[in-house]
Amino acid sequence: MPEYRRILLDGAVVQTVTAGDDLVAGDGRRVRAREATHLPPVTPTKVIAVHLNHRSRVEEFGIPLGPAPTYFHKPVSALNAHRGAVVRPVGCAWLNYEGEVAIVIGRTCRNIAPGEAGAYIAGYTVANDYGLHDFRDTDAGSMLRVKGSDTLCPLGPGLVTDWDFRGKSLRTYVNGEVVQDGSTDEMEWDMHYLVADIARTITLCPGDVLLSGTPANSRPVRPGDVVEVEVEGLGRLVNHIAASPAPVRTDVGAQPTESEEVRSTALGGDWELRGVRAPRRS
């Protein structure tokens, strides 16, 4: 399966194709993948994510799944790349990982049937749909700051074409330990359904990204942690958590909170029963 990666090479943005441990540019230049400065593998006009899709996640929260998926939007300014730093603002404690598969649109898509969606998909990549749950009590349910703050949408390492999404494993690791272990087969709505559903009223453009949902056990991470998401056939997306040098401003807007909803969402819906303490803010 071909895999394409966008990198910075001698100061320019270059698309490369993987060749073993190397990345090869169109002009023949080669660079070791582990030494390359990666960029997000695509340049979307929009990033749309489904709320709940994996059955294990639904069971974890004990929330009945509706008859159709619901979605939220992540601004493109949230994009991040393989080996990029995911930044947790000072004064915030509830930054959660969410390992996912990202669908990448290949050609303009509008008003199609699920059975036609495959022809409009360029390929797939790995995503980590981070959530800054300290802001969950703001924005009237839009989750704009929760999911759309800067650096909270890593994609990569590359775009893989000709990948069959059926029966693939998905695992997330924090500091080398498995923390999420799921499969694409536990999705209530598959990749083609999600594309067709959104495209009923929203035109999807080449490069646009749809995030397809995360398995159970999304939990908070803290500065210094290394988070990896591995999807069978798509590779492993690696990021580290960093602290911002300055806190969120306090002279404007809603401030971070630690409400019951924040804790319940960040810790999986049953934090009181688990006796889990809040992660340290340092």
Image (cartoon, helix red, strand yellow):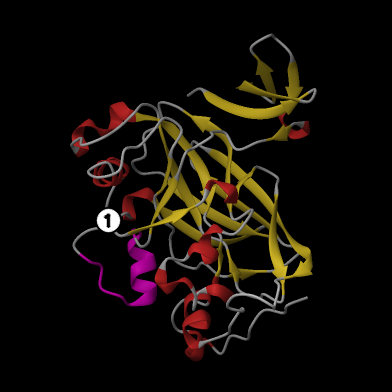
Residue behind mark 1:
188
The answer to whether residue 190 of the structure is visible from this angle is yes
Picture coordinates of residue 163, whole percent (x, y): 41, 31
Picture coordinates of residue 17, whole percent (x, y): 60, 21
Q: How many numbered marks have been drawn onto this rendered protein structure?
A: 1
Judge left or right: residue 203 versus residue 129: left
Q: Quick check: is 59 in the magenta stretch?
A: yes
Element carrying mark 1: loop
Q: Nearer the viewer, residue 110 or 211?
A: 110
- Give the amino acid type for the residue marked by disc 1 in the picture: Glu
The answer to whether 190 is drawn above or below residue 123 in the figure is: below
Q: Residues within 10 Å of mark 1 (few under 14, many from 20)?
A: some
The answer to whether residue 19 of the structure is visible from this angle is no
Picture coordinates of residue 205, whole percent (x, y): 39, 33
Judge left or right: residue 121 versus residue 95: left
Which of the image's four quarters has the C terminus? bottom right
Judge left or right: residue 113 versus residue 198: left
Which residue lies most toward the top here? Answer: 27
The answer to whether 109 is drawn above or below residue 181 in the figure is: above
Q: Nearer the viewer, residue 198 or 229?
A: 198
Magenta region: 53-66
Judge left or right: residue 245 versus residue 160: right
Picture coordinates of residue 251, whole percent (x, y): 69, 78
